[in-house]
Image (cartoon, grey):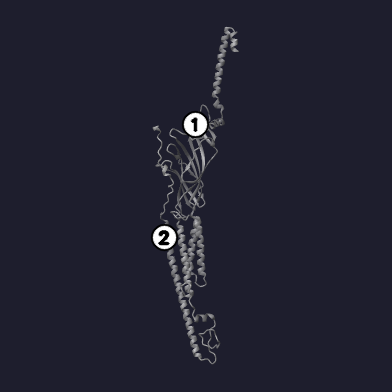
Amino acid sequence: MWKIRIFFMPAYQGAEMVSAISTLILLMASLTVVMASGNGTDCDRRCLANILVDKELLSAPQGDNCTITVNITAIQYQTLSFDTKAMQMNSRIKINMQWKDPDLGWLLDKYKYPAVVLPVDTIWTPTIVLDNALDTTMEPYTNDVQVRRDGVVEHSIILFTSVSCQINLFNYPYVFGECPVAINGWRQKFCSLKLNIADNVSLIGGSQGEWQTMNVSKIADKSQANRNYLLVTLSINPFGAFVTLILPSALIMLADLMSFALPFQGGELNTFKVTLVLSFTMFLLILNDHLPNGGNCSPLLYYHFSFCLVCLVLSVLISLVLTRLAEDSSIIPCIRKKTSKATKTHGSGKDTEPGGGQEKDNPDVIETKSGGLISEQASLQKIVKFLEKLDKEESGKDSIVAIAYRLEKCAFFFFLTIYILYAIILICITRTDICKVNNLDFWDQSTSEVDSYDYSSE
């Protein structure tokens, strides 16, 4: 249209029209440039996030050396529980990490935002390897990650892990041990995931029932790559085990020692000692359900309970033998000593009184019926002999009972000496460190010396 009008206008008007058209073209070009440059400012954070999501960067960022470096900026550790019987520690670990993905970055002159938030499942996130874990569950702390302008991604995860930890329980319940939790990347011949773990390790929730978490620290093996671990220091609160196991065992042994003051007659002594044995057996079952009964460092408490049980049973056997000696004047089992005629007569209450003239069941007493052949004087002599024999048997029995009590006294001092020596030996043993454990034998030696790939040879 403009061209048609130019052909039919004068020359001076045509020149003005050309100048106007040129000005219009310059204005349109400037507007186009402004609109093109305004595309970045008109795109908000969600728009920018959608642009990054559309890239579908689900694979790991890979440089020339095929090494992915992840910086662990902070670790928050918590011991959830410790199973003393199975020797397993359950933990919760929060890890804050950073890594750089250049493909997620943008230019400042194009997008003015310093950072955006992306869904965690739309980009690649690293997987932490726990070398000594029996079971591990990894969950994102949040469902979003923060991506900065330079491509640095900030992310947090929660690890619920269970590790096997052999703690020296020899001096239980006075136990102090350390458990490692190996947190590493992975390494193959050509590619690897490298973790740079900072010393920013914090501990929360130190007490978990019987066990207490005293400290946690990061340890790095400088001689080997990918050998980092958290060293968790644990100890036991000895009050509960002392009250429920050690103190009852000491009181039962003291009660058994004092039971030697009971008399033999009536059977109360043996009944009391058998009750102590049964009570101690109950505590032994409780100990067996609570502590492991195998391994290189079995608790000394097992040996203590075994020693106490042997002493209790030996004390019961000694009391049974001394009771039989006092009652039957014999220690041979299954053989009962025959009672003499004088003893039977004395115990039956059918003796013949002098001058009574009555017939009794005792054959040793001579019948004094009218017209008998034995005179009254001979009858009195027989009665005197009977009483002397009875006194002699009673005197012999009393001497045997006295011997039994002397033997019981000797047994008392014997057990007292044994207990004192045992206490001294037990204290000396608990003061020495005679058992060692190694919780760092889980490393895979086959991959410890993997050579890195030399890209310069290509």
On the image, the x and y values in percent for residue 180 come to 45, 46
Query: Residue at the bottom extreme?
Result: 371
Query: Residue at the top extreme?
Result: 10
Q: Is residue 5 above or below residue 286?
A: above
- Could you say which disc has been placed on residue 103 in the image? 1
Q: Quadrant of the N terminus?
A: top right
Please report whichever mark, 1 or 2, sits nearer to the chain's N-terminal start. 1
Crowd around label 2: few <14 · some 14–19 · many ≥20 (10 Å): few
139 or 269, which is in the foreground?
139
* Residue that carries the numbered disc 2 in the rendered image: 425
Residue drawn at the location 42% of the way across and 58% of the way down: 427
- Could you say which disc has been placed on residue 206 in the image? none
Work out how far the residue at label 1 is from the one at label 2, CA to CA, in angstroms: 70 Å
Q: Is residue 374 above or below residue 334?
A: below
Query: Residue at the front extreme?
Result: 458
On the image, the x and y values in percent for residue 144 come to 54, 37
On the image, the x and y values in percent for residue 303 come to 45, 59
Whether residue 457 sits left or right of residue 320 in the image: it is left
Cβ atoms at labels 1 and 2 below 8 Å apart: no
159 or 364, which is in the foreground?
364
The three-letter amino acid code for the residue at tag 1 is Asp
* Nearer the camera: disc 1 or disc 2: 1
Residue drawn at the location 39% of the way across and 32% of the way down: 457
Q: Give SS at disc 1.
A: helix
Examine the rendering and report whether any part of residue 26 can be seen: yes
Q: How many marks?
A: 2
The three-letter amino acid code for the residue at tag 2 is Ile
209 or 105, which is in the foreground?
105
Examine the rendering and report whether any part of residue 243 can be seen: no
Whether residue 156 sits left or right of residue 454 in the image: it is right
